[in-house]
Amino acid sequence: MLKNIILAVFLIGFVGCSQKSEMPHHTHAKPKVMFQTVSEKDAILVQEGKEKYHCHLCGMNLVKFYKTGYIAEDESRKYQYCSIHCLADHLNQGVELKNPKVINVTTLKPIPVLEAYYVVGSKVRGTMSRVSKYGFGTLEAAKQFQKKHGGDIMDFNGALKEAQKDFQ
């Protein structure tokens, strides 16, 4: 009797192990890439040395937060920021920057901040702020993004004013 029970348990275990197709498979989903992120080959990075990949102010990865990025310079060097939040923070420190540019979400190229259209407060997550701010090279591109994700369209001064609220 004991022999039969052991044999039955063995056979059930053997048959159960041999039917792998019926066993649940655990798959590991790829982590979702954030909207702000681009591949390194698509990112234009202007800083040099060990700071090349990091926001001048907060140190966050510039490739990971590329679509919310800004570039500016002073007399001695170029700066790159992960967001308008960090650009505003640097300006609040009294620095005088020239030639500020925002990353155009559509083309991934830097464009002058005063030529861009900004979608502020969309459902797409922002960087360094609860209120997102994305720059576009054309009003049409900003409207298409706004239609899909919400938010308000404004100029650079409006977007910068919104970013300054983070420091009040």
Image (cartoon, helix red, strand yellow):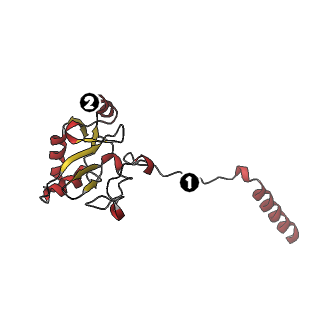
Q: Amino acid at mark 1?
A: His
The image's mark for residue 135 is none
Q: How many marks?
A: 2
**In this rendering, the label closer to the viewer, 2 or 1:** 2
- The residue under label 1 is 28
- As drawn, is 129 to the left or to the right of 5? left
- As drawn, is 35 to the left or to the right of 23? left
Disc 2 secondary structure class: helix
Name the residue at 34% across, 33% down.
148
Disc 1 secondary structure class: loop
Name the residue at 69% across, 53% down.
23
The image's mark for residue 139 is 2
The answer to whether residue 12 is seen in the rendering is yes
Picture quadrant of residue 3: bottom right
Mark 1 Cα-neighbour bin, 10 Å: few <14, some 14–19, many ≥20? few
Q: What quarter of the picture does the N terminus occupy?
A: bottom right
Q: Earlier in the sequence, mark 2 or mark 1?
A: 1
Picture quadrant of residue 109: top left
Q: Amino acid at mark 2?
A: Leu
- As drawn, is 113 to the left or to the right of 37? left
Residue 38 % position (x, y) = 41, 47
Name the residue at 19% across, 39% down.
114
Residue 14 % position (x, y) = 80, 61
Tell me, yes or no, whether the two marked residues, 2 and 1, touch with CB atoms within 8 Å. no
The answer to whether residue 39 is seen in the rendering is no
Residue 156 % position (x, y) = 19, 41
Kindly give the residue lying farthest to the front in the view shown.
Answer: 76
Kindly give the residue lying farthest to the top in the view shown.
Answer: 140
Q: What quarter of the picture does the C terminus occupy?
A: bottom left
Kindly give the residue lying farthest to the bottom in the view shown.
Answer: 2
Whole-angstrom CA distance, mark 2 to mark 1, is 40 Å
Mark 2 Cα-neighbour bin, 10 Å: few <14, some 14–19, many ≥20? some
